[in-house]
Image (cartoon, rainbow, N blue to C red):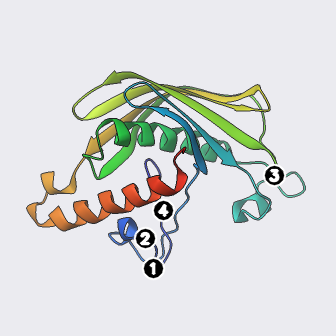
Amino acid sequence: MAGFRVCARNSDPACRLGSPERMKFCLVDRIVELNPGESIRTVKNVSLAEEYLQDHFPGFSVLPGVMMLEAMVQSCAWLSRVTDDFQFSTLLLKQARAVKFNSFLKPGQALDVTATLKKAGSDADEFQAAGTVEGESAVSARIVIAKSNLITSNSQLKENDQRMVAAMRELYEQIRCR
């Protein structure tokens, strides 16, 4: 995923580079619409079964704002991956500007994320992203995603790049619109 990268023990090949104690959060449940080089629309469903909701906040469970932002970052990363035909193994949040949180997202609700590619670059892409809940604005931001391959910094990491790209292609097949 893009942005905050946390992975579970014995998880997918894209996560084997990090510590075995890391967890993975996939905050895009479904890619509803995707126009390469232009825009994407995704959905993140919130379930009471998500562990972090037990502590955020006791008695008033809501999706943490950082998770709403991460859902937008991951949506932008999917648009970037598909636009570039999965050319890059690593897509990370470089910058989030003008972030606005407007409402809460509770279990049983869905965050509908839309993102538009504003500027494509060789090493970073810029997006305008927004999330709504039941038609009402929940979050918005201008997001910059950095794109790279591990082999650029270490020639011995070519196989790692290949594994990560393969894992992202496989995940894309599971969540993409059909």
Q: Are marks 4 and 3 in contact (CB under 8 Å)?
A: no
**Percent of width and height locating residue 134:** 80, 32
Give the mark, 2 or 4, whose residue is nearer the N terminus: 4
The numbered mark at residue 12 is 2
Is mark 2 in CB contact (under 8 Å) with mark 1?
A: no
Secondary structure beneath dot 2 equals loop
- Distance from label 2 to label 4 (Cα)? 12 Å
Disc 1 secondary structure class: loop
Estimate the spatial distance between the alpha carbons at disc 3 and disc 2, rounded to whole Å: 27 Å
Circle 4 is placed at which residue position?
Answer: 6
Q: Earlier in the sequence, mark 3 or mark 1?
A: 1
Q: What residue is shown with label 3? A: 107
Q: In the rendering, at what x and y percent does residue 32 appear? A: 59, 39
Q: What residue type is disc 3 on?
A: Pro
Query: With respect to residue 120, does 93 lie above or below?
Result: below
Distance from disc 1 to disc 4, alpha carbons, whole Å, reads 12 Å
| For marks 3 and 2 on the same chain, the one whose residue lies earlier in the sequence | 2
Identify which amino acid the numbered label 4 is placed on: Val
Foreground tag (4 vs 3)? 3
Contact (Cβ within 8 Å) of mark 3 with mark 2 = no
Q: Tell me the distance, in whole angstroms, between the alpha carbons under discs 4 and 3.
A: 22 Å
Spatial CA distance of label 2 from label 1 is 7 Å
Q: Is residue 95 left or right of residue 146?
A: right
